[in-house]
Image: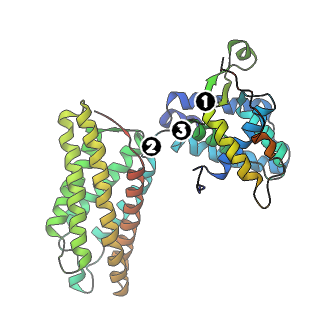
Amino acid sequence: MRRKGGTGLTRHEMRLLAAALRLTVQGSPDLYGYELFAMLTEWEGAEPMNHGTVYRCLRSLFHGGLLEVYEAPAFERVAHPSRVLYRLTAQGVETARQVTVRLAGETAPLAWIDIRNALLPTPLADPP
Amino acid sequence: MNPLEWGARRRQNELERRAQDAFLAEIAVHWTPAEPWQRRLRWRSSLTHLGERLLGGGPTMAAVGVAAVPTAIGAALVTVAPTPHLHTYGAGEPAWSSALLTLGLFGLMFELFRSPRTVHVRRLTVLAALPLAVGSYDGAATVGWHFGPDKVLVGAFLLVGTGMSVIVLANAFVSTRLGQRSVQLALKLSALGCLLVVAADYPWTVMYWRDHDREMSLGCCCAATGALLIAIGVLRSTPDVAG
């Protein structure tokens, strides 16, 4: 996968970061894989990212220090025994903002990219 | 056997396996593809997940194992190919060295598929490093000295031979940090040797092809291509080292 200049991220990783920022700004900072996949599928319509790629990007962003990973708290594990949650780190938020601005500034930007997400405060709480 | 389970058990570390299992479990619970495009998406996703099982997460030498296949085939072809038409294009007396290199490359392929994330020095020595070291030194001593590519290949053999020898010697102190670091550096040194193989074998590919020595040309081309992929794979990855 070709790396983009500047951020050092692939386009898929940039899309995922922008989606994570959007969900975080909307008040859902604890992300899980299916949620990201479902939201991207809903937003992108006919050509969504496959969920294997979503997972690969999550792993890559985690290793890059842009996401942190933790297991779901006990009360949530009753309904979802194996749920693993992802959350943007401070560095991840900063990079996601840059990426959102960049994607929004493209000639034909993705319809779901909203530059306001890069400007609004991000409700990041400490992980449980 | 489910290939995803097989891949998970053989390739991934525990943390990444759990994370991917959790991810797939969520998908299985919540997402049931109904439309044709969703089924196509599921199929593509399965392939990506399988790739992640095999190659994703942490340094892995699996790609080097794959790259050893064309190199081994190339070395085998050079061993069995008819004598070149123009005698000066012959690579000296390479039969023994090519045979040992072929053996070592197949051993390398086997060992890296068996354990792509951790180099087990003793097993690697027996299966790959020893035959590759002897074959490389033998090649350096016997290869022709008529053309520029010949001289480059001698350098390649010496580098690979030195790298593999260090791995053999590292058996004596593999439990120490120095020993493990030596193995990692020896692999990088061998990768540089592989790059010289590329520089030597592609010109030979052209020369043999021009003289209608098709088998030799194909062998050199395979060896050079595989050596290039091995070099890239080794230079990009620094695996863990164990005894």
> Which residue position is annotated with label 1?
A68
Q: Amino acid at mark 3?
A: Gly
The crowd level at tag 3 (other Cα within 10 Å; few <14, some 14-19, many 20+) is some
The C terminus of chain B: image quadrant: top left
Q: Nearer the viewer, residue B123 or B81?
A: B123
Q: Position of residue B12 (x, y in %)?
A: 51, 35
Q: What subunit carries mark 1? A: A
Distance in Å between CA atoms under marks 3 and 1: 25 Å
**Residues indicated by labels 3 and 1 sit on the same polypeptide chain:** no
Q: What subunit carries mark 3? A: B
Callout 3: SS: helix
Quadrant hosting residue A72: top right
Callout 1: SS: strand
Quadrant hosting residue A88: top right
> Which residue position is annotated with label 3?
B7
Callout 2: SS: loop
Q: Residue at x 59, y 53 (%)?
A: A6
> Which residue position is annotated with label 2?
B60
Evaluate whether residue B3 shows in this view: no
Distance in Å between CA atoms under marks 3 and 2: 13 Å
On screen, residue B145 above or below B95: below
- Of the two numbered discs 3 and 1 in the rendering, the one whose residue sits closer to the viewer: 1
Q: Amino acid at mark 1?
A: Glu
Residues tagged 2 and 1 counted as in contact (Cβ below 8 A): no
